[in-house]
Structures are given as structure tokens and as C-alpha cells.
Amino acid sequence: MEIFQEAMNIETPKGRPKMAICYDFDRTLSPDDMQTFTLIPSFGVDKSEFWHESDTLAHDNLMDNNLAWMYELIKYSKFKGKSLRREYFKEIGRDVQLYDGVDTWFENVNAYADEKGIDVEHYIISSGLKEIIEGSRIAPYITRVYASSYLYSADGIAEWPAQVVNYTTKTQFIFRIAKGYLEEYDQRVNDSVPHSDRNVDYDNIVYIGDSATDIPCMTLVKSKGGYSIGVWDPETGNKKKVYKLFGDGRLNFYAPAVYTTDSPIFGYMKEVIDEIAAKQKQKDRRSELSDAAESFKRKSAASAIIDSVRDELTDEEKAVAEKILKKIK
């Protein structure tokens, strides 16, 4: 009777649809590199000088740019006798400036999505320092921060890069978010995951960034039916990067990096949420039609099996079989 019991399992529980918004950080949510607000000045070094030294180190040694600045921070900390501690990074995270409206953006987006019956998860995917972002004012709203980070000694002092995130490695986190394998060390990120088991559908993912370093993520998300949004600094008004990104087919929208409820980007986000909600209604209807068709298929198969062995069934088994057929019908 096992096949009959399986036939009864025809209802698929449906929760609220979920979407994920992924953000670059530097010059997307914040007007400058996060290291420049407190960290680099604490060494008594001009930020232009620091980045020039870091870029030169990377160029001369065929080195990843992010590894170069992480090395430079440790070098300066030793030279100045200032230990780079995890707690210190989180502490200075509070000093990182944010664009207008970022502080209230997450609650406003969540509230609008909730009205449409959608749950939102927010993710940071940044080449900056994870611990600084985790100390920022927006950290409580972020589901997970993917960024460069240090390996710390038993005393909590930064010793060696533990994670380096650059423009190409950023894409792995889109797959992690979609598949639900969120831990950086989880190698199942390369596994094929059935649509029904995904954490977030690819076409429900939004990526927001500002420059060429975001192109791999923008391209990936947009190619899978999701949405990519480019932003520019409202102070400089320089739209050159987003014009090129849009012209190259990398973006769905572009807007100034202003995140208030009356801003263009908030309007675009509402349109995206509306579209996801409409698509979800279509998905639900197709699922209902599929369930009905599958039920008919199972009923036909179960009826054929029951008819072929009816003479061999006990009265109790016949009663169970008829109950199952009635349930499917």
C-alpha cells in the first residue's frame, strides 16, 4: 500500500514569496571607501597616499588589490604600534557615513514589500572590510555581510586575510543566496538545487552597485531574470559610469544614491516589488494547475493499480484504497 500512501501526498505548502536585495557598500550606500573615514586617518596618512601605495604594491607584485590594502593596513598598524582588533573595526563602523535615506531605507522597503505579501532579505556583498560593515548603523537590517575579513589571533588581533572579496568572487554569493548555502566554506554552492528547494528565486534578486567592479554580479543577476540598479554620487552628479553600464545592457535602472521614500531608486524598487508580486500570482496559479494535473495523473495510475490487484486485496486494503482515490479526486 506504500504507493497509495505516496499518492496522498499531493499538497505542497506555500509560504510567502521571498526576494533578496544585494548591495555593494562603498560608493553605493556610503559616499567613500569605508577605510577613509576613521581607519586610514588614524595612522596619520592621507587617504590618497595610502591608496597610491596600495595600488603600487599590487601592480609591482602582481597582487590582488584587496590583498594589497589589507597588507598595508597591517603594515601601518605595526609601524604605528596600533593593534588592529576586531572590536576596533566594529567600533569605527559607527563613523562610516551613509548616503541620505540609507538609515530608513530598509524599514521602508520591508514595509512596502510586506503590503504586497513579500518577505525581503538584505545582503551586503562588498570588497571592503566585513567587521567595519558589521559595526555600521545598518548592520541590524542585514541578513548577512559578505566582505573581506581578517584571521584574528587568540587576542583578537588581525594577522592574515581570511576572506578576500573582489569583483569576480562576488558572484559566488549570489549563488549562495539563491541556493541557501550561506556559509562561505560550504562547497555545496556548486551543487544543482531544484527550483522548489531554493532559498530565493533568481528572478527575485536585486543587485545595487555603482561601478565596473559590480559588473559580474549585475550581469549574473540580470541574465537570470533579476534586477540590477546602478547608482551615482548625487554630490558630483557624475553619471558616466551608469550611462555606460546601462548602455552595455548591465542595468535595469539607474538613479542617484539617495534612498529616501521620494527618491527615484525607491520608486524603482516599488516597481520591482510590484512586478515580483504579480509574477508570484502567476507562479501560484501555474502551481495550482500543475497540482490538479498531477493529481489526475496519480488518480489514474492508482486506479489502474488497484483494478489490477483488486481481487488480491483484503476488505481493509480495499477500503484504504477507495479512501485514497476519494482523497485524490
Image (tube, rainbow, N blue to C red):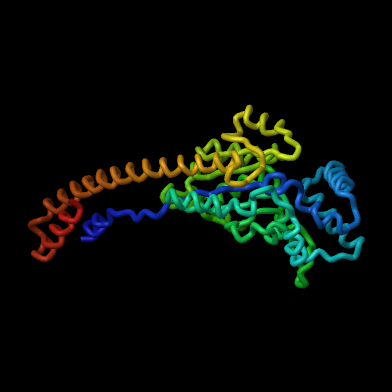
Front residue of this view, candidates 240 and 129: 240
Q: Please give the count of numbered marks on the rendered protein.
A: 0
- Residue 213, by quadrant, is top right
Q: In the rendered view, does 82 fall on the left or right side of 92?
A: right
Q: Residue at x 57, y 43 (%)?
A: 266
Q: Is residue 62 visible?
A: yes
Q: Residue at x 79, y 63 (%)?
A: 159
- Residue 160, by quadrant, is bottom right
Q: In the rendered view, does 274 fall on the left or right side of 318?
A: right
Above or below residue 11? Residue 264 is above
Above or below residue 245? Residue 171 is below
Q: In the rendered view, does 109 fall on the left or right side of 298?
A: right
Question: Percent from the top left, x then y, of residue 319?
Answer: 11, 62
User: Which quadrant of the figure contains the N terminus?
Assistant: bottom left
- Residue 256, by quadrant, is top right
Furthest-top residue in this view: 247
Furthest-bottom residue in this view: 155
Question: Percent from the top left, x then y, of residue 49?
Answer: 89, 47
Front residue of this view, candidates 31 and 17: 31
Furthest-front residue in this view: 262
Question: Percent from the top left, x then y, of residue 77?
Answer: 87, 61
Q: In the rendered view, does 76 fall on the left or right side of 133?
A: right
Front residue of this view, candidates 98 and 228: 98
Question: Percent from the top left, x then y, of residue 234?
Answer: 71, 39
Q: Is residue 198 visible?
A: no
